[in-house]
Image (tube, coloured by chain):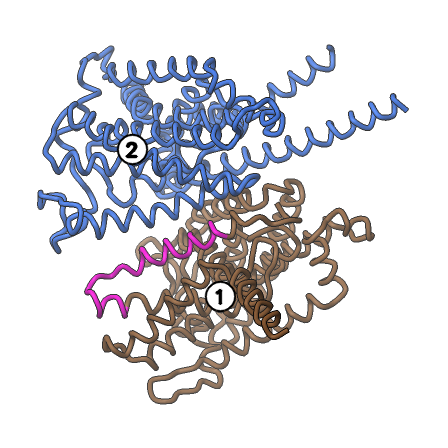
Amino acid sequence: MNTKKKMNAGEFIRRGSVPMMFILICALCIPIAGLSPTYLANEIVTRMGRNAFLILSLLIPIMAGMGLNFGMTLGAMAGEIGLILASDWQIVGIPGMVLAMIISVPISVLLGLFCGKILNMARGREMITSYIISYFINGVYQLVVLYLMGSIIPIRHSSIKLPRGYGIRNTVSLLNMRQKLDNLIPLTIGGVKIPVMTFIIIALMCLVIIWFRRTKLGQDMRAVGQDMEVARDAGINVERTRILSIIISTVLAGIGMVIYLQNMGNIATYSSHSQIGMFCIAALLVGGASVDKASIGNVFLGVILFHTMFIVAPRAGAYITGDSMIGEYFRVFVSYAVITVALIMYETNKRRARREAGQELVKEQEKEA
Amino acid sequence: MNENAKTNEKGAIRKALENFGLPRLIITGFLVLLLILAPFVGADLPTQISNIIARFSWNGVLVLAMVPMVHSGCGLNFGLPLGIISGLLGATLSIEFGFTGGLSFFMAILIATPFALILGSLYGWLLNKIKGGEMMIATYVGFSSVSFMCMMWLVLPYKSPNMVWGLAGKGLRTTISLEGYYNQVLANFLKIEIGNLTIPVGTILFFALLALLMWAFLHTKTGTAMTAVGSNPVFASAAGINVDRIRLLSVVMSTWLAAIGILVYEQGFGFVQLYMAPFYMALPAVSAILIGGASVNKATIMNVIIGTILFQGIVTMTPTVMNNMIHMDMSEVIRIIASNGMILYALTRKTEGSR
């Protein structure tokens, strides 16, 4: 009992170290950056509304033991396709967003199915495989958007078409949808604009995730995440459960991307999705999640800390070194470094657990002998 | 009897096909098709072939850098950018110290070596701590180091006017011309020119030398030990091989070859590319060796040569042929799909011994 408690304390420090470090970085950078509190609060609230839903989509594959889903980029691409089509059909405002989400769902399901099938073939190296899948599908996405749209898939409006007659422009303006969801219920507290409707949707999503954990499927996923072989012996269809977890994650990422882009107000057709996976994963990890364990609390803590760092680092860097590029590079470096450290900690913990299990087995055998 | 031989033959062909793999077959077929089509769409075949040979000579060493880590069971070296950074440090320091011409190339290799050894050892030590998750962590070690160096290129006190931003007088430029330094230093050595066909014999010889050394190394006692560690670490350790030490050695070798590889690439290309440029350099090298027939835990020198020719062939041929044929430059998309598809294919193969 006593040893268990001690281990928990160690565990707590290990889990808490990354958020603590970020609190320290933010605490150091905020005064140096010299931004007004209102501006800072506004930015953080905006970014929370923008990113939280996307990050929530990462939780379910972690639950099913498939690690960080780098394949969430696939959902983001589906969301973008939905938005491109909706804006070509000139459906504006909230109906346009809903339509974009509806279009994205079947695409996300197909892509998620593809991703899940492949990940089942590459068991034990899911993360690197899902990472390469995101590059692979990015190629397919470019093929569709750059060559097929306008030539095979009808695109009517020349404002989003490239001058050569087919393919989509580098940026698609979403002026008709811009922040329509955020501003649906206008509310400003002390100069801080709060996107009430977006927060309501995010809160609903959190409730759905909590509910989902208690369903049969959710329980199955946790069992699969704990131990695939035991789950299979218990009569759970492991392959199907794993594929479902990826499909759900992809669909959520697609919807999350629509929310993200309505806040941004335009789509960078060929680059919006490429970084989204990395930033979402980094934010989740900053919030104290690990490769095999993540909670809703991690999501929100992560968004706040990560994006505070994101806002203040360039300004602080510019102030210290006189060169604004340093801060830009610094935040990119931190994002990658956080993911690297989290991955290293996960692998070393896994090895330690395996070794401890081995030692216990030896002890038991000695006892029996 | 005769029939038996026939079925045997059929089986052998099928087996050979299976070994060769469907994606590889498609890619080879595609390249052959491009080569056949080239004259019809008005592309000059000798120029095209010279391009392929030139690009092969630039990239060969980078692809060769994959071999040691695959052999020792560390998987594909997605952390190649770490080695590339050592090479870039060598290149920029050699220019900074005022070496010119062929000497600057030699000095770049010399200066890059200690960096590659130190970074490679740290990287190898790390990979020994996390056996089983090498590839994912390697990817992110590469990314972190590239973004860290982005800051360093700005901060480090470089002075040479050929490298720093003219206006500010500090911070390295994103691309640095090698004119007057080691531009084409290997390629111009023993260069053969027949009409439109150019062969950079010097660069190819340099690659051949390194490949030969690698081949010879793999046949020494340490080299066979490396293969043993890769195919079955438990058995290797039971046979008295220090598994961790061998793995560390393979990572250091891979990192050093990557450093040399980027220098060879630069001398052909004519420019040093800094900042985010090394970011995506691992993926082409990884897919090249896979296209050449390697798997996650098996690679030979032949895989390197065939893979580099096929990959670079497609990269150079698709733009010209496609552009002339359908007036649509789909080469970039085709390259992304083909190279990443190949990596996916390799990752989904069941491979014993390595995870």
Q: Position of residue B73 (x, y in %)?
A: 64, 52
First to last magenta residue range: B320-345
Q: How many marks?
A: 2
Amino acid carrying mark 1 in the image: Gly
Is A250 inside the magenta-drawn segment?
A: no
Mark 1 and mark 2 residues within 8 Å of each other at the beta carbon? no
Look at the image and give the colour of chain A.
blue
Q: Is residue A52 visible?
A: yes
In the visual, does B68 lie left or right of A87? right
Instruction: Tell which subunit mark 1 falls on.
Output: B
Chain appearing in brown on the rendered image: B
* Residue B263 to residue A349: above or below: below
Q: Position of residue A43 (x, y in %)?
A: 29, 24
Instruction: Tell which subunit mark 2 falls on.
Output: A
The single residue placed furthest to the bottom in the displayed view is: B194
* Residue A185 to residue B218: above or below: above
* Residue B196 to residue A358: above or below: below
In the visual, does B122 lie left or right of A147? right
Amino acid carrying mark 2 in the image: Pro
Examine the image and state in which quarter residue A77 appears: top left
Kindly state the secondary structure of the residue where label 2 is placed.
helix
Q: Nearer the viewer, residue B42 or B77?
A: B42
Q: Main secondary structure of the magenta part?
A: helix
Which residue does the image show at 38% across and 15% down from the upper left?
A208
Which tag is nearer the camera, tag 1 or tag 2?
2
Dot 1 crowding, Cα within 10 Å, few <14, some 14–19, many 20+ = many
Report the residue marked by disc 1: B307
On residue A106, the disc is: 2
Which residue does the image show at 47% across and 46% down from the upper left?
B143
